[in-house]
């Protein structure tokens, strides 16, 4: 090559090098610009979808309040952001029908539809129109869209049979059109029909509708439970009065699962007394006394106590059967043998009792401790935080469920759990299948935490201060990879009830006042205060949804555990140690409340009866909790 200088400033060989390098640099710059533009476009698209979701939710809220003009404005805003958005088109069409008086509004006392999660924004509950507003001309709709609109109108009006006909017709003529939403609405109407039938006393028809719902969602644990209990109740009705032993066995099964189910408690006591009378007539005094003793444990009266005492005296001078095998053993009767009886003037004098009853090992209304507890703690050797699973009774050592994680929560069916991942490359919420080890990353914000599953196990609520203002918000998302989190309310520590679609959380009213524990629906509506102390935190629902437990350091000078009914009202204090008692969790049967405490010097898990009583230590925590407020407990079967 000729290296002599050229007529220009650079030798020829240098020009050959500079040329390709310049082209490559220019290409890299263009590529960087393209990638930057694409990233910006993706971020803009995420923000646009969030704005669409917020506007749809506002439109739904305004419509529920009868503010139709404002609802219309929000739907129009959606169409500006997302032209052709089906939810907005559906909302505007339904507003048109309301304004024209074509769609009958819901009235007080009408059955409220149970919204299917897949279509919650697509068919909001109807509300009586209060104002008229200028409406735009409705867009031309295709046959399947028109059919969908008719189904929505029928659904909102509570016309379940018409809704079913229209949805089935839609599935036949256009099976791919909004298939998930259509299936969700169909599931919903079967649930509503089942509820109506049950309320009307027709349990057989209710079971038929539940079966239809289960055909659509065979893995729905709530519906499987409802079907099992309804079938058990029907079987009990068939044998009631004919076979008291079998009747009691069935009622016991229902009572242990949910003591508030229908009239199970009253029927169980009636059956126990009837069976006890039948046994007494046959001269089986000890077995008869066992039935009366179990009945007294449910609800006592002077007459029942007197009869129990008389039967026990005939059984053996007031002596209870030597073993439970001497009488028919059921969960209620076994617990009754450990429960001190209420004082009564008709009771036999103590000196007449040759062998006193065993000293109580558990307070009244409590049950034996069982199940497993999920907790997170800091490993004493590595200093890393892990999620652990331990036997509630402390019989076996705790095992690690997930390394580098905290705040673990199992799905209601126990097949998968979600936790806050602390790995640098996996920050956010991660779902794990313990059986296969399959992990799914639900969110990628390090601030996301305190997750809780809904009853169906397909949605999650969590708290985060991910936004730039660093304010805590409660979010929900579908339990799937890539699902977008929807902001519900400003607040913290959300907990989803497994019994109904309600979330308890720490928050305030819209003006920032009346802070404490609040509850709302899974879509963010119907917000109600449960407590009024700002320091109340970490609410947890009872399995049957009847009460909420929480911790607070703003009531009695230090962190204690409390209980309040699901509808709010008087607060009951459950612990009183002078040490830290926190992070409550309710046992699967609702009888116990677990919590962490350092009352003995080191950290341990304790349990106290949910109705009040003395706490007992379940097991010690090996290592430390670090910042204990960042940990959590969950009690599972």
Image (cartoon, rainbow, N blue to C red):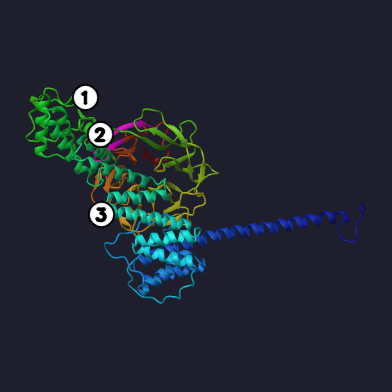
- The residue that appears at 40% across and 72% down in the rendered structure is 96
Q: Picture coordinates of residue 55 (x, y %)?
A: 44, 64
- N-terminal label among 3 and 1: 3
| Magenta segment boundaries in residue numbering | 607-620
- For mark 2, what is the residue? 331
- In the rendered image, residue 307, in percent from the top left (x then y), is placed at 10, 34
The picture quadrant where one finds residue 227 is top left
Among the two numbered marks 3 and 2 on one chain, the one whose residue lies closer to the N terminus: 3
Taking depth in this image into account, of 115 and 358 the one nearest to the observer is 115
- The verdict on residue 616 being magenta is yes
* Nearest the eye: 399 or 165: 165
Q: Which residue is the site of mark 3?
A: 200
Check disc 3 and report its element: helix, strand or loop.
loop
Instruction: State if disc 2 and disc 1 touch (CB < 8 Å).
Output: no
Q: Is residue 449 visible?
A: yes
Q: Quadrant of residue 128?
A: bottom left
SS at mark 1?
loop
- Residue picked out by circle 1: 323
Q: How far apart are labels 1 and 2 at the CA level?
A: 14 Å
């Amino acid at each position: 090559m000729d290296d002599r200088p050229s007529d220009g400033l650079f030798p020829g060989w240098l020009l050959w090098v500079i040329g390709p390098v310049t082209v490559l640099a220019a290409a890299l710059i263009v590529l960087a610009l393209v990638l930057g533009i694409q990233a910006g476009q993706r971020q803009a698209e995420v923000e646009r979808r969030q704005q669409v979701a917020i506007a749809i939710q506002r439109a739904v809220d305004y419509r529920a309040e009868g503010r139709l003009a404002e609802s219309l404005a929000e739907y129009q805003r959606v169409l500006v952001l997302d032209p052709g958005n089906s939810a907005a088109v559906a909302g505007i069409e339904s507003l048109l029908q309301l304004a024209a008086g074509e769609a009958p509004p819901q009235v007080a006392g009408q059955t409220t539809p149970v919204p299917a999660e897949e279509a919650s924004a697509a068919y909001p509950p109807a509300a009586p129109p209060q104002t008229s507003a200028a409406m735009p001309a409705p867009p031309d709709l295709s046959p399947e869209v028109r059919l969908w609109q008719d189904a929505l109108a029928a659904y909102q009006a509570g016309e379940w049979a018409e809704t079913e006909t229209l949805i089935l017709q839609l599935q036949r003529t256009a099976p791919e059109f909004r298939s998930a939403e259509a299936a969700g609405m169909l599931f919903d109407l079967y649930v509503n029909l089942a509820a109506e039938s049950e309320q009307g006393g027709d349990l057989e028809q209710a079971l038929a509708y539940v079966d239809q719902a289960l055909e659509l969602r065979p893995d729905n644990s709530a519906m499987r439970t409802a079907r099992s209990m309804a079938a058990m109740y029907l079987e009990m009705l068939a044998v009631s009065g004919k076979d008291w032993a079998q009747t009691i066995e069935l009622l016991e099964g229902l009572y242990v699962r949910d003591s508030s189910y229908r009239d199970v408690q009253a029927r169980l006591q009636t059956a126990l007394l009837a069976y006890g009378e039948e046994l007494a007539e046959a001269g089986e005094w000890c077995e008869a006394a066992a039935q009366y003793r179990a009945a007294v444990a449910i609800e006592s009266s002077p007459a029942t106590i007197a009869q129990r005492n008389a039967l026990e005296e005939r059984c053996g001078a007031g002596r209870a059967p030597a073993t439970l095998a001497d009488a028919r053993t059921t969960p209620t009767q076994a617990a009754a043998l450990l429960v001190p009886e209420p004082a009564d003037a008709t009771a036999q004098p103590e000196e007449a009792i040759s062998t006193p009853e065993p000293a109580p090992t558990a307070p009244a209304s409590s049950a034996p401790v069982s199940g497993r507890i999920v907790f997170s703690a800091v490993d004493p050797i590595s200093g890393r935080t892990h999620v652990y699973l331990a036997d509630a009774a402390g019989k076996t050592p705790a095992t690690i469920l997930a390394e580098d994680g905290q705040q673990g929560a199992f799905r209601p069916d126990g097949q998968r759990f979600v936790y806050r991942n602390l790995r640098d490359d996996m920050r956010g919420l991660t779902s794990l299948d313990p059986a296969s080890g399959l992990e799914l990353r639900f969110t990628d914000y390090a601030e996301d935490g305190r997750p809780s599953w809904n009853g169906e196990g397909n949605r999650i609520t969590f708290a985060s201060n991910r936004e730039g203002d660093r304010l805590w918000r409660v979010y929900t998302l579908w339990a799937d990879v890539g699902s977008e989190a929807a902001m519900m309310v400003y607040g913290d520590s959300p907990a989803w009830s497994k019994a109904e679609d309600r979330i308890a959380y720490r928050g305030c009213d819209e003006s920032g006042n009346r802070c404490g524990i609040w509850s709302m629906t899974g879509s963010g509506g119907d917000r109600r205060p449960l407590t009024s102390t700002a320091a109340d935190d970490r609410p947890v629902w009872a399995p049957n949804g009847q009460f909420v437990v929480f911790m607070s350091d703003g009531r009695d000078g230090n962190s204690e555990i409390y209980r309040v009914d699901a509808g709010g009202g008087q607060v009951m204090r459950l612990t009183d140690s002078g040490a830290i008692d926190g992070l409550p969790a309710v046992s699967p049967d609702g009888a116990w409340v677990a919590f962490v405490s350092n009352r003995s010097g080191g950290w341990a898990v304790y349990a106290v009866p949910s109705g009040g009583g003395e706490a007992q230590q379940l097991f010690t925590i090996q290592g430390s909790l670090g910042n204990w407020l960042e940990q959590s407990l969950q009690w599972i079967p």
